Image (cartoon, rainbow, N blue to C red):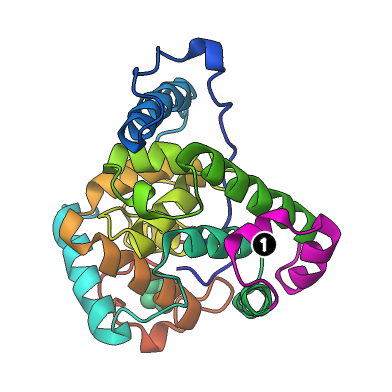
């Protein structure tokens, strides 16, 4: 990913459950296991809240001229992978670093947020020092990423919450959560919607998820699989479920590369397109 502004766009977030809504915590509160158990219970509460905001506009998936959507997706994934080679888009292997990187990448050009991330790592040696920095100083460092005051609030808020929930700014305890718990927890962090949470899971936790950004959405439109362009948040689960787990990572990364290099929104280079034979050239 996401090196694109679109990939990084965030979704509106549900309100987290109030403590009074939470189920009782297990007794061994002081142990790491106890903390993880409480976290699982907490994320289940949040998940219930998020599901209560059911999307009213589920995308209509259709088959083009009788084409099998599964075959179309597999064929496209292979063609895109052979062309772009699943490139490194600058994402981070360390989970907390990726959370920060994804927040920085929202609604800006890749040169801006990559520069801001480099400045951040040069100026602050630890995540604790980022968390505790004066907001004005941090915002100045993050300026190349744009929206720096908002991103400062989101990054410091996320780091504070992680430290509070896990007892330290280490990603070790996050990594042991299963997919549902990890996704639900990540979407409680300021600045991370469902798509961004799945980006973190894909890039730094090796989970088989398919974050749907603007490039992925455009690809599905071009393949003729969507009747009309849905809202990003309404497309996440429906399109992820269409993509076989084994090719989710490759399809996401190569769709981003395709959108950045060839199927550019304003001037697609159709003459040089690896999936021109299956493209419906739908204007969406
Ligand atoms: S043929 Fe053109 S519009 Fe279709 S996917 Fe390729 S670049 Fe995009």
Q: Position of residue 45 (x, y in %)?
A: 42, 21
Query: Measured from the top left, where is residue 264 in percent x and y?
Result: 52, 76
Q: Nearer the viewer, residue 92 or 166?
A: 166
Q: Is residue 280 left or right of residue 264?
A: left
Label 1, ligand 1: CB separation under 8 Å: no
In this view, 85 is above or below 279: below
| The quadrant where residue 126 appears | bottom right
Residue at the bottom extreme, as displayed: 272
Q: Main secondary structure of the magenta part?
A: helix
Residue for badge 1? 129
Quick check: is 218 in the magenta stretch?
A: no
The residue sitting at 59% across, 58% down in the picture is 103
Question: Which quarter of the picture shows residue 83?
Answer: bottom left
Asked whether residue 274 appears in the rendered view, the answer is: yes
Question: From this viewpoint, which residue is outermost toward the front?
Answer: 30
Look at the image and tell me in which quarter the N terminus lies.
Answer: bottom left
Please determine whether, in this image, residue 35 is positioned above or below residue 11: above
Answer few, some or many: residues within 10 Å of disc 1's Cα (few below 14, many 20 plus, some between 14 and 19): few
At 34% from the left and 18% from the top, the residue drawn is: 26
Labels in figure, total: 1
- The quarter of the image that holds ligand 1 is bottom left
Start-end of magenta stretch: 123-147
Q: Is residue 114 above or below residue 99?
A: below
Q: Secondary structure at mark 1?
A: helix
Residue furthest to the right: 136
Look at 49% across and 43% down and name the residue there.
167
Return the x and y of residue 12 as percentages of the image width and height: 60, 38
**In x, y percent, where is residue 39?**
40, 31
- Left or right of residue 192: residue 89: left
Q: Assess whether residue 143 is covered by the magenta stretch.
A: yes
């Amino acid at each position: 990913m996401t090196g694109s502004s679109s990939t990084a766009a965030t979704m509106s977030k549900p309100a987290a459950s109030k403590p009074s809504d939470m189920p009782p915590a297990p007794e061994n509160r002081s142990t790491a296991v106890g903390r993880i158990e409480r976290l699982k219970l907490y994320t289940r509460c949040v998940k219930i809240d998020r599901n209560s905001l059911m999307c009213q506009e589920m995308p209509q998936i259709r088959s083009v001229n009788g084409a099998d959507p599964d075959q179309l997706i597999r064929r496209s994934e292979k063609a895109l992978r052979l062309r772009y080679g699943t490139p490194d888009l600058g994402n981070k292997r360390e989970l907390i670093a990726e959370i920060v990187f994804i927040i920085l990448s929202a609604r800006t050009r890749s040169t801006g947020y990559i520069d801001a991330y480099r400045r951040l790592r040069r100026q602050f040696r630890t995540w604790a020092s980022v968390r505790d920095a004066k907001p004005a100083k941090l915002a100045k460092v993050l300026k190349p990423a744009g929206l720096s005051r908002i991103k400062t609030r989101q990054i410091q808020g996320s780091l504070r919450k992680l430290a509070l929930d896990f007892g330290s700014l280490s990603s070790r305890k996050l990594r042991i959560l299963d997919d549902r718990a990890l996704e639900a927890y990540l979407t409680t962090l300021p600045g991370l919607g469902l798509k961004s949470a799945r980006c973190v899971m894909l890039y730094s936790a090796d989970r088989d998820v398919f974050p749907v950004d603007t490039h992925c959405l455009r690809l599905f439109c071009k393949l003729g699989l969507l009747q009309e362009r849905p809202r990003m948040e309404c497309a996440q689960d429906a399109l992820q479920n269409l993509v076989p787990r084994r090719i989710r990572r490759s399809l996401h990364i190569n769709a981003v590369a395709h959108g950045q290099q060839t199927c550019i929104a304003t001037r697609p280079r159709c003459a040089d397109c690896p999936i021109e034979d299956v493209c419906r050239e739908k204007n969406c």
